[in-house]
Image (tube, grey):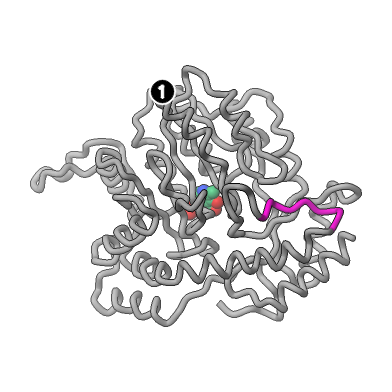
């Protein structure tokens, strides 16, 4: 993708000639569907990168969440704790599986779930927690994993935004019963659209693999007599070939993402009108999937105007996620009682993220910062 008219977009994926060669191999050999060597290879390489025994490649991170939740086989109306500040896919996966989502607000400086609030919301009906690492910084995992284990609560770790991040020197995506990832074009590594579920549990692996592929019967001659209500959420060989190539660069990608984030952070950290996500915590270093800013003081509720001014200056931005308790579809469906999620609501109203793609040059970061500081100072 080429940059247009000097615009600095929020993201441009980086695709090398090696990846093009792998995709071309699929085209040349006619292995273009979900059959073909690259799907297995990508699953093997990606799950081993995440220190997991098994990987199941799927068509998106959203599909991965739906399958992961269903694979747990929870009783109808069981409670599942989820973040109020994240992509709607999380809540959708719970609702579609006839389970009850229970929202956890986030922290003002990490934008991740408030772990103490999550622990307080555990009841006898809580059967699973979806732990989502937001924008490049992990949730502080130790305490919540310990309690979940004690109470036999299943954990799905959503590592869509943190491929390659470490929590206390252990790779994110290696925690919990299942972990899920997204390979949408703006993620650390991309397959265009795509996702993966990883696990160490053979039973869950088999169930997820079956659900991904319409739960066809294993019997060769009775294949069309299905075992469950599954989906066609398969990843194609073309996508997996791209993923195999992308994964080769993951160490550079993580290093460069952190460099981009650090450059923004060091130039913006003293601005008194902005809140930034923590750069370092006792358990991790932010790898900045995206670099977000939250407005404070006299700039409250001026977010959209500021984004418009940046756009006039040819700088792309995106608003933050919209909190789950305020989603119109969930209001209509009466999924949540009238509850407030004050921090999620605040950062959602006043937060947006800046160009953060791998194609971004340092001089472009400096230009974004200069213009942003002029607007917000
Ligand atoms: C944390 C998180 N989980 C899941 C998803 C869903 O991934 P996809 O867009 O591949 O469906 C996203 C998408 O951006 C995400 O940010």
| Nearest to the observer: residue 318 or residue 116 | 116
Q: Check if residue 149 falls in the magenta segment.
A: no
Extreme residue in the top direction: 124
| Nearest to the observer: residue 290 or residue 63 | 290
Per the image, the residue denoted by label 1 is 76
Q: x and y percent of residue 331 in the render?
A: 63, 30
Q: Is residue 306 visible?
A: yes
Q: Is residue 369 above or below residue 160?
A: below
Q: x and y percent of residue 72 in the render?
A: 36, 33
- Seen at 75% across and 64% down, the residue is 266
Magenta residues, dominant SS class: loop
| Nearest to the observer: residue 261 or residue 96 | 261
What segment carries the magenta color? Answer: 271-279
Work out which quarter of the rendered image holds the N terminus and state it.
bottom right
Q: Is residue 223 left or right of residue 17?
A: left
Q: x and y percent of residue 257 in the render?
A: 58, 66
């Amino acid at each position: 993708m080429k940059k247009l008219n000097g615009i600095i977009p929020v993201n441009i994926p980086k695709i090398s000639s090696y990846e093009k060669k792998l995709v071309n191999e699929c085209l040349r050999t006619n292995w273009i569907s979900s059959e073909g060597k690259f799907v297995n290879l990508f699953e093997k390489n990606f799950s081993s990168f995440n220190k997991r025994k098994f990987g199941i490649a799927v068509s998106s991170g959203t599909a991965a969440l739906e399958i992961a939740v269903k694979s747990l086989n929870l009783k109808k109306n069981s409670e599942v704790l989820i973040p109020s500040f994240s992509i709607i896919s999380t809540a959708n996966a719970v609702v579609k599986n006839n389970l009850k989502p229970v929202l956890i607000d986030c922290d003002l400086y990490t934008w991740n779930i408030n772990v103490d609030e999550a622990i307080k919301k555990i009841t006898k009906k809580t059967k699973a927690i979806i732990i989502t690492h937001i924008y490049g910084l992990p949730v502080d995992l130790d305490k919540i994993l310990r309690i979940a284990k004690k109470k036999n609560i299943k954990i799905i770790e959503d590592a869509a935004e943190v491929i390659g991040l470490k929590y206390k020197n252990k790779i994110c995506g290696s925690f919990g019963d299942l972990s899920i990832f997204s390979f949408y074009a703006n993620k650390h590594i991309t397959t265009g659209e795509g996702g993966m579920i990883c696990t160490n549990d053979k039973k869950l692996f088999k169930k997820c693999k079956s659900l991904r592929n319409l739960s066809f019967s294993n019997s060769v001659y009775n294949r069309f007599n299905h075992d469950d209500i599954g989906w066609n959420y398969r990843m194609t060989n073309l996508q997996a070939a791209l993923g195999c190539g992308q994964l080769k660069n993951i160490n550079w990608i993580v290093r460069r993402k952190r460099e981009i984030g650090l450059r923004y952070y060091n130039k913006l950290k003293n601005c008194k009108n902005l809140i930034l996500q923590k750069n370092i915590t006792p358990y991790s270093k932010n790898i900045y999937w995206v670099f977000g800013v939250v407005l404070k003081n006299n700039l409250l509720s001026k977010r959209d105007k500021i984004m418009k001014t940046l756009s006039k200056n040819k700088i792309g931005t995106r608003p933050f996620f919209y909190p789950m308790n305020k989603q119109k579809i969930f209001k209509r469906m009466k999924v949540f009682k009238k509850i407030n999620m004050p921090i999620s609501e605040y950062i959602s109203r006043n937060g947006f993220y800046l160009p953060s793609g791998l194609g971004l040059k340092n001089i472009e970061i400096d230009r974004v910062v200069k213009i942003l500081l002029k607007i917000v100072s």
